[in-house]
Amino acid sequence: MRRVHCSYHKCLTVYFGRVLKRMASAPFGLAGGYRHFASRLDDFYRDCSGLGVASVNNHALDLDRFDEIRVTRFVPDPRDLLVSGYFFHKQSREDWSRVSHPTDADWVVVNGVVPESVKATGSSYRDYLNEVSLEEGLLAELAFRRRD
């Protein structure tokens, strides 16, 4: 049986990853260990079969691809995702958030959409959020999370 946690970028992903790692080791000992696939759904489908537990961000799974599967998902308050994501991304050290003139392909790892306002400036996402007003930043975060 597959055990999978589906999450959203910046919704307890690091914390729950630590929990799942522990579950995959002693004393629980889920054979096959644990792996987080970020938003790389194709990698997840290809490589999850031997794992004791896996996690993937930002996608609804095609459950028909599995004989037996158990899925957990935290369903966050969208307002919390928006506000906490905005403040996190203003100081983000993640590579994708520091790319100037970003494209959606640069943000695949977080399943993000580049807001038109960011495209217009050519700034990195992090720099853009630090240059604009709170309202403009929250609107950019809302556009970024369009797929969520």
Image (cartoon, helix red, strand yellow):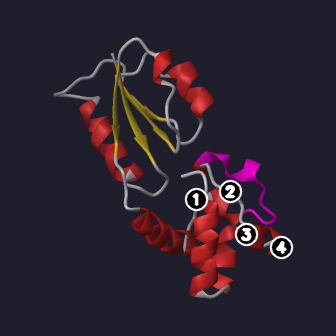
Position above or below: 20 against 44:
below
**Residue 72 at what x, y percent from top left?**
33, 37
Is label 3 in a helix, a strand or a loop? loop
Q: Residue furthest left?
A: 27
Could you tell which of marks 4 and 1 lies nearer the N-terminus?
4
Marks 1 and 2, how far apart at CA: 7 Å
Residue that numbered label 4 is attached to: 120
Q: Amino acid at mark 1?
A: Arg
**Residue at 33% across / 52% down in the picture?**
15
Marks 4 and 2, how far apart at CA: 14 Å
Task: State if disc 3 and disc 2 touch (CB < 8 Å).
Answer: no
Q: Which of the two residues, 33 or 59, is positioned nearer the viewer here?
A: 59
**Residue at 69% across / 65% down in the picture?**
98
Could you tell which of marks 2 and 3 lies nearer the N-terminus?
2
**Residue 94 at what x, y percent from top left?**
59, 59
In the image, which is nearer the foreground, mark 4 or mark 3? Answer: 4
Could you tell which of marks 4 and 2 lies nearer the N-terminus?
2
Residue that numbered label 3 is attached to: 124
Q: Amino acid at mark 3?
A: Ser
Q: Which residues are magenta?
A: 99-109
Task: State if disc 2 and disc 1 touch (CB < 8 Å).
Answer: yes
Q: Amino acid at mark 4?
A: Ala
The crowding category of the residue bearing disc 3, from other C-alpha atoms within 10 Å (few below 14, some 14 to 19, many at least 20), is some
Say the numbered circle drawn on residue 113. Answer: 2
Q: Tell me if 43 is positioned left or right of 26 in this view.
A: right
Residue that numbered label 1 is attached to: 145
Is 136 one of the magenta-colored residues?
A: no
